[in-house]
Image (cartoon, coloured by chain):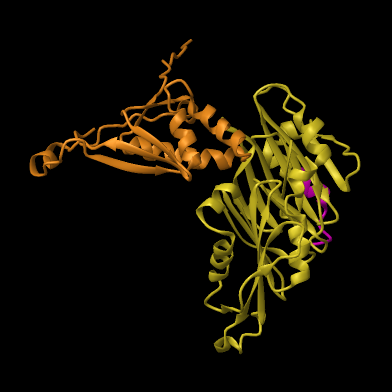
Amino acid sequence: MGFFNAKRDRFTREQQLAAKPIQLIDAKLTETSSGAKLQVPVKPRRLAGLLLRLPKGTTKTFELDPLGLLVWQSCDGKTSVQQIIRKLAKRYNLNLREAEVPTLTFLSTLARKGLIGLEIERRVRTADHD
Amino acid sequence: MTAVAWQGWKLDLPEGWNPVRLVGDFHKGQALFVDLERPRLGLRWETLRSLRADPGKAIEQAFNQEVGQLASQEVRDQAIAGADWDISRLYVEPEPPGRNVWIGFSRGSNRLLQIVQHVQRRENLLVDAILPALADSDPAVATPWSIFELSCIAPAGMQLRSQRLLAGDLSLTFADKHGWLTVRQVAVAELALARMKLERWLANQQELQRTHYVCDGPPTDARTTSAGLVARSRRRWRFFWNRRLPLELITYALHDKGRDRLVLLEGADDALIKLAANSVGWAQRNS
């Protein structure tokens, strides 16, 4: 195994659905007629921080539609992904699969942007050998 | 239970079992249904090659392939009340986890249908709930279709030409020798209309055909059961030689307030479109 291709942790579908997303940043949420606006503080990254000076209090705004807002508000560290999917399906009278696909896509976008983290329970595997 | 109908067959499945794989056409194909946790049910269908072929033998071969020779000796006949299955046989896994397998032959469509249910423990779901509602229809008659939240009845003789099953935007296009019919459903209407007006949805749907068609006048009120708009497009002059393209296309954009869905329909025959429009949502109305 090389240094640069270290094996990534792979999670089962069961673990992914049981994961509990949690908001990682202190964002300002403003509800609008078409959903909400989410203002998050911008933190310059290492190299960009040296080259580019950002004024204090710089924020980035994400526009959320009502579905996105519901998902964002459910990222409380207590509600699992599966529960969010069911909640969304029930609220908008959607099929589970139709709710699952956008929810997972949206959560992965939020995670990629560093807005949420996912708490995944890791089960310790025990093997019984005769 | 929710109805799933595809390529002529129809079954009732528990809520939360959804298709993740739909392959093939009327003559041969397969579907796989999963819930949030694991695969639950597989379905295969195949038309017998010739009318003289022995369906009994074909079923025997299918069982041998699916469960093996030893297990296929335990296969028993399974009567399904009210259905026109010429042959119907069932294998129940004696020691789950395993697979319960049902294979039947429908003379109406001349097809073998094979259902494989993955079972973790002893259960009678297949026998008690799924098989009694199983139906298979002849393509020569109007065929029910139901996938995810989109359900409609395709006019007789029309077969599925293409499908686009995106979360929240489902579309089926049926075609025969004379033309085609597209049924599209967008969920949730409340959010879709907040994003774009109904006129814009209608115009967007028309634009999909802009290579061959051009809008012919502003939209007018659609006289259907759901409120909405209708607009017409005419074939571009430069395609006068293409007789397969109908002269005129009619596009409907309807707001089904009861189900909170937008329904877009497009085709050349107004009467057929209206028939299809009335049938959209049959599965939800029946459940």
Look at the image and tell me in which quarter the N terminus of chain A lies: top left
Where residue A115 sits in the image (x, y, percent)? 33, 33
Task: Residue at 84%, 42% (x, y): give it.
Answer: B88
Q: Given the current orientation, which residue lies at the most extreme right position?
A: B82
> In front: B198, or B88?
B198
Q: Is residue B154 visible?
A: no
Q: Colour of chain B?
A: yellow
Where residue B114 sits in the image (x, y, percent)? 73, 44
Question: Can you tell which quarter of the image residue B132 is in?
Answer: top right
User: Magenta segment, which residues?
Assistant: B48-60
Where residue B250 sits in the image (x, y, percent)? 67, 72
Instruction: Locate residue A112 relative to residue A32 in the image: left or right.
Output: left
Residue B236 higher or lower than B255, as above or below: below
Where residue A100 sits in the image (x, y, percent)? 53, 38
Task: Residue at 42%, 19% (x, y): give it.
Answer: A121
> In front: B216, or B150?
B216
Magenta-drawn stretch contains B55: yes
Q: Colour of chain A?
A: orange
> In front: B31, or B63?
B31
Residue A115 higher or lower than B206, as above or below: above
Magenta-drawn stretch contains B21: no
